[in-house]
Amino acid sequence: MDRAGGLGRRALLACGTLALAGCSSLKATPAALTASPTMRPTTPTAAFARLMEGNERWVSGDLQHPDRDPNRRQLVAHEQEPFGAVLSCIDSRVPPELLFDTGLGDLYVMRTGGEAVGPVVTGSVEYGPMTSGTPLIVVLGHQRCGAVKAAYESLRYGKSLPGNLQSIVKALQPAYKQAVKEGGADPVETMARAQVELTATDLRSNQDLAPLVGKGVLAVVGAYYSLDTGKVEVLTGAPA
Ligand SMILES: [Zn+2]
């Protein structure tokens, strides 16, 4: 699937957050990263700033479309070192690469209905931080989330959704309970925000990621995207 292919986990972890050019145990193509038009952020703060700057361009329309040309494709064809991992909804209006104005090889992206997680999704989110020093995870919820609304109504009125959709409802149950507890004028909106905060908190404190967060080499940010404005609002965990 990427530069991890054919490499043992130990070798990857041994490389930690070292730049690829400095990691002798990998078949590096140093030019792939050093020649990138946009240097890869290596700290949580820098990675977070890069994403938020990209979102500001998305909001204003002053886009750079970085890392999207044939040169970039060739540069990352053999190796990748994304600076962020984003878990967002499947919603067609919330594509992380666009709303953060990023390009090829910049982000790992996981998308599920309502950012629902289970072991496979969590493992996918952990992949970058645990194997190649990806310094930032963003859990991104959004306005008018259909998955959250459907799950809310299913739980509120006790009606199961058909087929595997019910597994999304089950995964969003903690957010529903949190929303009921919090109350508020728009319970679906409250639930969508709760889903982000609970998921970010779980990731930040899980046994695999907590040590990285503790060392300051990883931040887990919870954020919320406005369909109306295009703006990403930080809810929790912004690096200092
Ligand atoms: Zn959604």
Image (cartoon, rainbow, N blue to C red):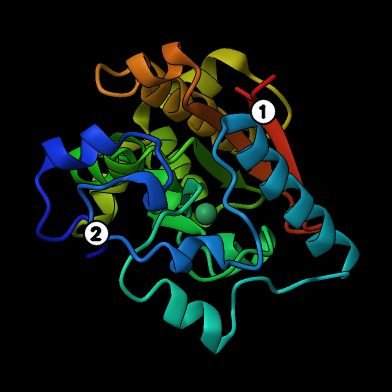
Q: Nearer the viewer, residue 234 or 219?
A: 219
What residue is rendered at 90% in x and 63% in y?
60
Name the front one of labels 1 and 2. Answer: 1
198 on left or right of 162: right
Reading the image, the residue beneath label 2 is 162
x, y percentage for residue 48?
65, 38
Residue 10 shows in the view: yes
The answer to whether 192 appears left or right of 6 in the picture is right
Which mark is first along the chain, 2 or 1?
2
- Seen at 36% across and 16% down, the residue is 210
Q: What residue is rendered at 50% in x and 46% in y?
A: 84
Callout 1, which amino acid? Leu
Q: To which residue does mark 1 refer?
A: 235
Where residue 156 sits, quadrant-wise, is top left
Towards the viewer: 131 or 202: 131
**Above or below — where is 85 with respect to 34?**
above
Q: Quadrant of residue 23?
A: top left
Q: Amino acid at mark 2?
A: Pro
In percent of the image, x 67 and y 58: which residue is there? 100
